[in-house]
Image (cartoon, helix red, strand yellow):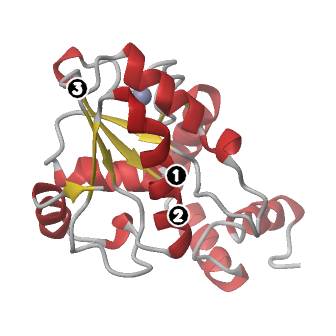
Amino acid sequence: MNSNNKDIDILIQLMAKLPGLGPRSARRAVLHLIKKRDILLSPLADSLFTVAQTARECVTCGNIGTMDQCDVCSDLRRAIGQICVVEDVSDLWAMERAAVFKGRYHVLGGVLSALDGVGPEELRIPNLVSRVGDENITEVILALNATVDGQTTAHYIADQLEDLGVSVTSLAQGVPIGGELDYLDDGTITAALNARKAV
Ligand SMILES: [Zn+2]
């Protein structure tokens, strides 16, 4: 038992599964929420319910939104012939916070990994190849993390796109080894995008 009540215990146990929270922080958070029922707990419950009903993957790019097409894909001004390839939705959101990239995205959902049995089919790479043909794409920018698997994935994608007449570039220096875009400040992301180089 985390509290002396079954319903509150269920809430604490669920909160303790969140990234960065353990049972102790979850107990504190739940107590705080209950004390702030009107200004925090009730709005949070409403918001969780709404997002649970509406959140979905964009059918085109894999971003998370509340419609079949995410806000980026449904914005015609962003059809400028550039696709930025990222590993995860959190990387896409980091790029958007930097507000420097004006094109569209493609979320792979991970990187190739022989060890974990992750192949191209699991990563939406075939979808990327068809988008390049369908959307008049002139440049694919690889914004993958500087891990070994990330770089293996970058080379694999570059090979797949080789015969499609599209320019393939990669974010320049600035992404630290093993670094994730989500942890970079906006200026570093901007510099890495502006100084991108051909793969
Ligand atoms: Zn989208």
Q: Is residue 65 visible?
A: no
Cα–Cα span, label 2 and label 1:
6 Å
In front: label 2 or label 3? 2
Q: Is residue 2 above or below residue 137?
A: below
Disc 1: which residue: 156
| Quadrant in the rendering for residue 144 | bottom left
| Quadrant in the rendering for residue 123 | top right
| Amino acid beneath label 1 | Tyr
In front: label 1 or label 3? 1
Cα–Cα span, label 1 and label 3:
21 Å
Q: Are marks 1 and 3 in contact (CB under 8 Å)?
A: no
Estimate the x, y position of residue 13 in percent, counting from the top left.
79, 68
Q: Which quarter of the image is occupied by the N terminus? A: bottom right
Q: The residue tagged with tag 2: helix, strand or loop?
A: helix
Estimate the x, y position of residue 57 in percent, counting from the top left.
56, 31
Q: The residue tagged with tag 3: helix, strand or loop?
A: loop
Q: Which mark is residue 152?
A: 2
Q: Is residue 180 left or right of residue 34?
A: left
| Amino acid beneath label 2 | Thr
Q: Is residue 78 above or below residue 122?
A: above
Task: Give me the residue at 11% from left, 61% from top.
Answer: 195
Q: Along the polypeptide, which appears first: circle 2 or circle 3? A: 3
Task: Give me the residue at 22% from left, 74% from top.
Answer: 174
Disc 3: which residue: 81
Q: Which class describes the residues within 10 Å of circle 2: few (<14), some (14-19), or many (20+)?
A: some
Q: Are marks 2 and 1 in contact (CB under 8 Å)?
A: yes
